[in-house]
Image (cartoon, grey):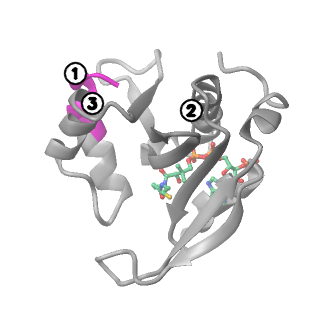
Amino acid sequence: MTLEDLARVLDIDRLSFPLPWPERTYRYELMENSAARLLVAQDPSVQGESVVGYIGYWLIVDEAHISTIAVHPDFRRQGIAEEMLRSALWDAAARGAELATLEVRPSNAAAIALYRKYAFDVAGRRTRYYRDNDEDAWIMSLNDLLGHVRQWMPPA
Ligand SMILES: CC(C)(COP(=O)(O)OP(=O)(O)OC[C@H]1O[C@@H](n2cnc3c(N)ncnc32)[C@H](O)[C@@H]1OP(=O)(O)O)[C@@H](O)C(=O)NCCC(=O)NCCS
């Protein structure tokens, strides 16, 4: 992701999350947070705004913490999130991550199905984590990251 992608990313964020990140958060992540990595998925057949999804993670010592993932509603159920997740986890493993973690709303069946497909398990809960509705967060984690990514096709 670059600053040029921001307008489109912010559109997708607003369409995807009850609590979208403000623009300043993306700017901080892109320009100042050395632990942050943000990747976009682009569809070359789309005229103009070709970004159709994005994923972020923070590399904290040996842990890759997925900070965000979203796909534009018009492009869902085409395997884009899956490809982005594999790419981010490959990238993180190559940079020394040994496990991956994330937070997800227990009501977010689509995201939970995605993470379970990639062998994430529920490892804990943060009580009343989400400010909009006081929903808890599940913490999901994937241990032995390298062992898992070796089984997946390398990203294109
Ligand atoms: C969750 C999200 C990123 C999935 O993106 P996507 O590109 O549509 O997902 P994919 O097509 O790669 O699907 C991969 C797997 O995820 C699961 N999945 C995705 N959407 C699903 C849905 N609506 N219902 C059930 N399972 C779903 C399935 O296991 C699917 O594998 P399958 O096709 O073999 O069944 C997308 O729905 C989204 O942007 N949601 C809003 C933002 C969000 O909730 N992010 C997660 C925050 S924790």
Whether 43 is drawn above or below 57: the answer is above
Q: Tag on residue 88?
A: 2
Residues shaded magenta: 1-9
Q: Residue 76, percent across and down?
A: 54, 45
Mark found first going from the N terminus, 3 or 2: 3
> What amino acid is found at the position of numbered circle 1 in the picture?
Glu
Residue 123: percent from left, percent from top: 67, 68
Residue sitting at x 35%, y 25%: 1
Q: Residue at the location (51% across, 62% down)?
A: 103
First in sequence, mark 1 or 3: give its number: 1
Circle 2 residues within 10 Å: few <14, some 14–19, many ≥20: many
Residue at horizontal 81 percent and vertical 28 percent from the top: 150
In three-dimensional space, the C-alpha distance between marks 3 and 2, rounded to whole angstroms, equals 16 Å
Q: CA distance from mark 1 to mark 2?
A: 20 Å
Label 3: state its secondary structure: helix
Circle 1 residue = 4
The crowd level at tag 3 (other Cα within 10 Å; few <14, some 14-19, many 20+) is some
- Write down the quadrant of residue 4 in the picture: top left
